[in-house]
Structure formats: structure tokens, C-alpha cells
Amino acid sequence: MRADLRIVNAAQRVEGPLLFLKRSVDVGLNEALHVIGPDGIKRLGRVATLDEESLIVEVLENTAGLGVADTVVSMLGEPVCFNVGPNMLGRVFDSVGQPLDGDTPIPAMRRMRIDGMTINPARRALPRDFIETGVTAIDLMNSLVRGQKLPLFSGGGLPHDRLATAIAQRARLRDSDSGEFAVVFVGIGVSHDVAEGFRAAMESSGALGHTTMFLNRADESSSQRLLTPRYALTAAEYLAFVEGRHVLVIMTDMTNYCEALREVSASHGEIPGRKGFPGYMYSDLASLFERAGCLHGYDGTLTQLPILTLPGDDIGHPIPDLTGYITEGQIVLDRDLDRRAVYPPINVLPSLSRLMDYGTGEGFTDADHPALASQLFAAYANARRVRVLASVMGQEGLSDNDRDYLAFGDAFEERLISQAMARTLEESMAAGWQILGLLAESELTRLSNEQIIRYVRPEKARA
Amino acid sequence: MTEATVSWLSGPVLRAHTTGRFHVSDAILVGDNRLLGEVIRVETGGIVAQVYEDTTGLRPGDHVTSSSEPLSIRLRPGLLGNIFDGLLRPLAAMPGDTVQPGMRETVPVSLRYRPVAKQGDHMHPGQLIGEFGSGVVAGKHLVPPGVGGEIVSIAGEGDYEDDQVLCVLRADNGIETQLDGGHDWPIRRPRPVARRMRPREPLVTGQRIMDTLFPVARGGRAALPGGFGTGKTILQESLAKWCDADVIVYVGCGERGNEMAEVLNEFPTLEDPRSGKPLLDRTVIIANTSNMPVAAREASIYTGITVAEYFRDQGLHVALMADSTTRWAEALREISGRLGELPGEQGFPAYLSSRLAEFYERAAHVETLQGDEGSVTIIGAVSPPAGDFSEPVTSQTKRYVRCFWALDRDRAQARFFPAIHPLNSYSEDVAALARWWQARGNPDWMDHRRQILTLLEQRARLERMARIVGKDALPPRQQLTLLSADLVNEALLRQSAFSSVDRYCSPERQTALMQVILRFVDRAAQALEHDVDLERIAAMPVLRRLQRASEEVPEEKVAQFRLLMARLDEEFDQLERRESHAR
């Protein structure tokens, strides 16, 4: 790190988030700097454009109060970095990695670039360790594995925070040796009560000591909002790949992040893309989500659980659409289920876990798990189809077989998806076999004869 | 070597003062880290260029060098079984856990070499000079395109590094060319061939819905569009695993890093059903994941197709999987926007269509310069926003491909894979491939195929009708159509990529399965004519056996289908006998 290089009297113009300077020192592209106004506040910035005479600085914080004559710029001589070190767990930080809890700053063991470095795909290990969350719709139907990035697609008023908190409290590996775990909670543009609710829940389950929080409040500037997940993921990378922990990063709410991206892009005068979001939003989101994963030769892993509230409950909106193309599946919360008091209101059909096939089955969970999940999916999809038929002409026009499906569909939502308490995978599977007993055997085309005899017939007999 | 000095920098775009000569599309190296870039515009005394890598830390005054050649990659033996980035830099050999920017010297590959031509021979472009080693570094040493002449000297049999001179040619004008084990080729220029041939044989994919209903010819072009979660990647991976190409070039363009890990993790453990060797040994992976620089993403597609053509020129059949061409088009859009070009539809540059055409036209079944037969088949995934097939990339791609495998969200949500929608997909290669199926033991392939598609079409129509009048109100004949179509869907078209029995289905097993299913359809219709109750037919024990046949009759027991057929006939005979007795 080079010494603090101060430039005085170089500012020529302030325009939105951009500060135009005369170039009097040797700086490189993307290097970080502090812009200090007459108010004495240090604002983080980075070099966006430079030529032989001048340079343009993108100020990453609020530019209110900045002038031309009395602005001092101090160059840091390197890209934006975050000082990370031991004892980060149990702490609360603000958008730009400063302690919010009034405690002393953390000892800087390492300086890591907040943008992270692109993981070499050849060094990635395939995520295959099944995480048991206690939620049947996830464990049985859309299994989560360590190193995965699996977002919750939700909507305003749906219980995504409750679900995320429950997963953070409960997630564990099935074998006893689950290693050191940690939770990084990233509140992006969240209100105080959401952050406090999460903190209280972690405290009550005794897991606060394993939790690091990064909070960007709703009233902070948009450019800061873009920094928050970067600081948090840098901390998560440190916890995972330096300290060797299994880190679960919960990011809420990514919709606020994308809105901020749109605002900052507009203030830069960039050409807008779909619904005004910048064309590079896919790449930008990927630079966050791709920081999840497992690496060869490292014990720690980084799992991401971002939360998105779908604008207008529209899954085709650019934010969920681009997210879905980057993440390894999605868990979709459903307003209809929520109205019918099904908790967790997860609609399994549009939900998906891409890595499920790698982390389930023989040697991972249970040899019959994939076939059971596949059969439940097929049957539930058919049940939904029959429901549409029945809604048009009533149950009278249905065949017996179709009526079985209607009963199955209700049981699926009320007895399998809905749960008052966490279930182990075994309990979830048992519930699954049980409701399959409602269907004729000839319908169970995705199960082998042995599976039917062993699991479904006893349930039928009991019924 | 010409030089320039950086004068202006913004993101990946730079301007530089020049002293020597620069040309549009020349490759450049920037700064101490030798970051790779490409000249976009040339002015008097200056250039505008884009850099393919992270430009953090660059500053005015940094020097730019260029060898006045367009962006090229070095084609050489030893590519198979390896993973590269979008500019063909080996990723496995890179130190550290993260991708490091900058061009480094490539590590030479040791090779066994055996000369075939001899001193004094007159060589034409594409002619065979010698042969390289064995296994993954096996290959032909051919005269590169555009070079020729008399052999002045040639290396004897022995071990060499790939950058050692193996042969010296003297052209008629006296200019000598030194040839080592590899050569550079500009990625945006198609490699020459003797002539293009018409499609004759299919690329057998081992996936029933593709081979049987919508086959792609060797040298053909196919698109695989689908919204997120419809199974594009799994299907691309299945094709890469089981299709009967000699070489697979797998381009991960702007997609997930874990997908590359999947390929690297799985392919060494799977066996090529034809050669018995690990699948990785026939695969080249080009990985430009979504968090790698966007400009290199644009180049990665061309890198992939150039590598594919290199193997094609050795007389091999190559399949190129590009996942996903939408990310490539978005990279074009991003760069175009930064250069201030006028945007076309949805912000994509106006030349999107011609770029797509150029890319897909590089797929072909050809006679190589050496006189061998080779092919490149392109299978491009498309990721339309919100699954809307009317968006520019999908609709433009549709103009240039011959096979369209439309993925369907409803099928995917019911976990019905491959989720290719049989009514929205098509193949223009069908007529050309009928003869091949005849030779492989299914003379009625065209008929069977049409029968199946008709059945599925009728099902869609009846389903709509049933929604209004109720299923029970349909006459038995139509209810039987629904039953038959469901059987075709479940037993023939559904195929699990994760089942060790069914992930690959040979043409013979496809034919046997199709025959027995269509026999059921025929016999059931006959039985209905003989007044057999539909419920009786639906309750036949053989029906369940048929539904699970693809899962329970493995490749090596295809003969069991004959037993199944006999069983089916027997059950129907019984049904009909009982019915006539009852009367």
C-alpha cells in the first residue's frame, strides 16, 4: 500500500456522483480514494476514467456538501479493500464495513478486495453435501447443498424473513462432524425492525456468536447499497476460506440492491435496458452470486441464500429472471398458499434446486429419495391440472382417478408442505410415502415395484 | 512489433497514442501484466481498443504492443481433456485459486512424433506431415491452411515439445516456413475446407425425443431455447456425454462456475460407450463463467468454434455445445453500448443477426483439405428473458438453425425431463436422415415418428375439449387417444439424465421401445373396435411394464423387448377372447 497521497485544489466539477479532477499524481484505474469535503466526512470513491490531464472519480457515497475549492482527495493506491481479521463473528457492521456496535475495530489480519477475485472454475469442487433445513419443501423436494446459491423468491407480506431465519437457526449436516459454521446476515436497504428481528431470533437460539451482520439502512445512499453485499461477501470469504468455516450468507433484499443499481446507472447517464435496469445487471449480479461455492483444498464453504421480493409478484420481472439464470435454482413463495395459512407457503412446482441430483440419493441422503421426490412432483403437477379442470365443470365431470388426484393435491399442501415444526429428512420422506397412498398404484410410474411394495402398500393398508 | 502509449482509460476501453502501424481487429497486449485486447478503431496517431480482462491499476503512460495480427489462438495437440478460458489459456495450469489476468508463456506439451512425409515431398495446405503420440495428445500433424511447398527438412521419430520446429517447407517463391507442433489461427476466420457436403447421417444423441422425433444431422445446427430451470444445462451436458461425436467442445459462456465443476468432476468417471475411455478424454472445455470479463465472453464462442474446426480438419466428427448464446449476445450488446453504437431491437446491436449467422454457418459436414470427412455440429442454448421466444436472440437464432428444441416450463415444473415440447419443436433434417434409420433396422421410422406426433397433437386438442365438457364425456376412442398419448410421454419421451440405465438409449433400443409402444396403441384401438371396455385396457398389467420399460430394460438386454411384445399380444388376445365369450 502506497502512502496517503493527498490532492488539494484539484477538483474542477461535481456532477451527480462524479467528481472531475485535474490529474496531478500517478493513479491507476479503479483505485480507491477518499473524498473529504469541508464537513470533514470521508467519502469512499474510485477512479472511473482517467487520461493524461484529468481523472473522473465515482464517489460511492453521498456527494451532498462537496464543493470545488475546499475538497481534498486522498489516494489509497489500491482498489477498494476491506480489513478482515479474527473475531468478526458476533459483530455488526455498516454498509462499508465499519463497526456499528460501538465496539473496537477488528484487527486487520488481511486486506481483501471487496470485488473479490474470480474463482478459477478448474479449482471449484462440486457441491454435494446435503444440508438439512428442517423444511420438507426444501429438504425433500428441492434440496439445498453446501456451496449452493439458492434464492428465496418472495413477495411483500410473505413470511420470507421467518423462513430464512428458521433455516439459519436450524441448517445442519446430517453427519455429526459438521465443522465450524457461521452465518453472515446482509441487510440491504432493510428497515430497522427486520434487522432487529433477525438479531433477536439468532440470539434466542444461541447462535448470535456465530453471526456477523452487515446493515445498510433504507435511508442510506444508493451507491452505498451497492457496496454492502461486497463488504459482506468479502467477510464471508474470509470466514470460509481463511478460517475454514461453513458460511451461510443471507442477503435481504436483493430487489433493493437492483433498484439501487438502476438508480446509480441512471445517474451515470448509461443506456437503460429492460425496465430501465442497466444491460450489465446480469454480470453485476453474477459477480456477487458466483462468490458462493466450494474450493478444492479448503475445508470451508460459502452458501448463499439471497431473498428477493418479486415486484408485482411477477417472476418474469428482470430482477428474478436474471437471478434465476445465475443461481442454482430458486425457492418460490406463493401468496395463495399463504392465504390458506400453509406455512411455509412454498410452491414446489416453480421451485427448483439444480444441485439436488448431486447431493441426494444413495450415499448422500437415501437411495429412494430422488424417486420419491420425482413421483411427488409428477403427481402434484397433475393434481394442479385436475384442479383447473374441476374449477370449470365441478367435481361431477371427473373420473375416480381424477378425484384421487384432487384429494392428493390437498393432502400435499396441508400435510406435506405445511408444517408446524421442523422435520428430519426421514420424517419428511415418511409423510411423502403416506400421501402417495391416496393414488392408484398404476399412477405411480416413477416408482419401482419394490418401492411401491415397501413404502406405499403399508400406507394404503393403514388407510 | 508496433507500440503505443495509453492516453485515456475507462472500464475496459482505452485510447492510445501510436507510433507504428495498427489495424482494426489487431490483437494488443497492454501494460506490465500483458493484458490481452483488440483494436476497435484506428485514427491518425491513435487507436481505440477494448481489453479482455480486468483493467484495474492501468494508467496513462502504460505501453501497448502489437504483433499486427488479428486475435488468434494457438491450436496444438494436448487440448483434449483440458479446461481453458475464453482466450484458450489453460485454467488448470494457472497458479492460485483465482483467475489471474494477463498473458503468460504457455507451457509446452511433450509429444511423441512420427513423420509420415519425407524430405523433398511437395506439400499442399492440409496435407499430412506426421502423427502425434497417443491418447489425449494423439493427432495429425497437418500443413496449416495457407502454407505449402517442398519439405526442406523434417524431424525423425522421437519425443519433442510442441513448440520445437518439426518441419521446414520452402514455397515456390523460395520463402521458408518453419512448422512446429501447433499453429496460430485467427478466431474470427473460418478455417478452409475442400468442400461442404450435404447432411446424411444423424448425430446420435442417445436422447429419445431428439433422435426419434427431432434428429440433428452431423454438421447440423440446433438451438435449445428455454427459460431458467427448464433443464438446458443438464440436457447440454447429457448431449456432451452421450452423443456419438469424436470430440466435444463444451463452451460455458457466461454461465455458472459450478457447471464447469460438474463437467470436470463427472466426465473423468464416465465411460464413452463407444471407445471405453473416460469421457473427458474426448472433451475440450472452454469456460468463461458469468463473473469473468465480458469482452472475453464475446471471444469465447469464436475460440470454441475454431478449436472445433481444428479437430474437424483432422477428419473427426465434432460437436460444439454453446451454453449460452444469449450471454454471448449480451456481451455484444454491452460492448456495443460502450462504443456508443446505435442500438437495434432491445438494445442489441443491429449486426446481432449477421453475427449469429456467421457463427452458425461454421457448422458443416465437410471434406477436409486432406480429403477426409469431418463435421462440426453446433448445439446452442438460448436463454430468453422470461422464457419469451419472441425476443431478438431466440427469433434471430431460429432463422439460422435447422433444429429447434423448445423447452417447456410446464413440463419442467412437473419434473418431466427432457422438457422439450414435442409440438413447438422441429427438425428440418428428418427427410435426409430417414435412410440412415432404415439401414439401422427401422424402415418405418418416418411413419412411426408421424404417428407419435399426430397422437400428441390430438392429445393437446382433446385436453382443451375435456376442459369444457369433462373427460368422462369424451367418447371412448378419444379417451383411448389420451391414454395412448400419456403412454408415449411417460414411456418414450421422458428420460432421466441421472438414471444409469436410461441416461443413454441406443438407436436399437429406441426402435424396440417405439415399436412395442406403437403396437400397444394399435392393439388397444383394435380391442376397442371389438367392444373391449376402455377401463379393462387401462388396467392391463402390461401397461405398467411398458411405462417403466425404458428404466427396466437395459441396453444389453434389448432382446427382452421381444418378450414384452409377446406378453402384450397375449394380454390383448385374452381380453378380446373374453369379450367374445361374454357375447
Image (cartoon, coloured by chain):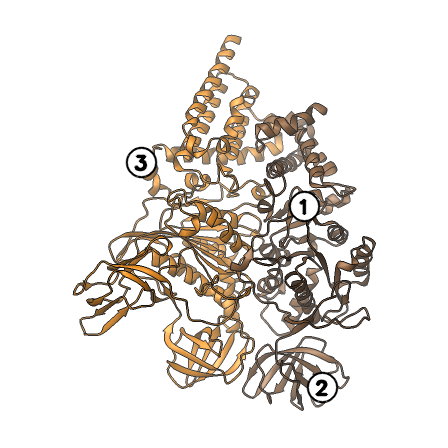
Chain colours: A brown, B orange
Quarter of the figure with residue A345? top right
Mark toward the viewer: 1 or 3: 1
How many residues crowd around disc 2 within 10 Å: few (fewer than 14), some, or many (20 or more)?
Answer: some
**What is the chain letter for disc 1?**
A
| Residue drawn at x 53%, y 32% as measured from the top left | B486
Measure the C-alpha gap from mark 3 to mark 2: 82 Å
> How far across and down, in percent of the image, does residue B89 sit?
45, 65
Q: Amino acid at mark 1?
A: Asp
**Numbered circle sitting on residue A248:** none
Q: Amino acid at mark 2?
A: Gly
> How far across and down, in percent of the image, does residue B82 sit?
44, 58
Badge 3 and badge 2 both on one subunit: no
- Look at the image and tell me whether residue B292 can be seen: yes
Q: Amino acid at mark 3?
A: Ala
* Callout 3: SS: helix
* Image quarter (top left, top right, bottom left or bottom right) of the N terminus of chain B: bottom left
Which residue bears the numbered disc 2?
A67
**What is the chain letter for disc 2?**
A
> How far across and down, in percent of the image, does residue B90 sit?
45, 63
Return the disc, 2 or 1, that comes first in the chain's sequence: 2
| Residue drawn at x 55%, y 65% as measured from the top left | B98
Mark toward the viewer: 3 or 2: 3
| Residue drawn at x 67%, y 32% as measured from the top left | A433
Give the total number of marks visible in the rendering.
Answer: 3
Measure the C-alpha gap from mark 2 to mark 1: 60 Å
Which residue bears the numbered disc 3?
B439
* Callout 2: SS: loop
Up-down relation of residue B210 to residue B335 (above or below): above
Which residue bears the numbered disc 1?
A175
Farthest left residue in view: B120
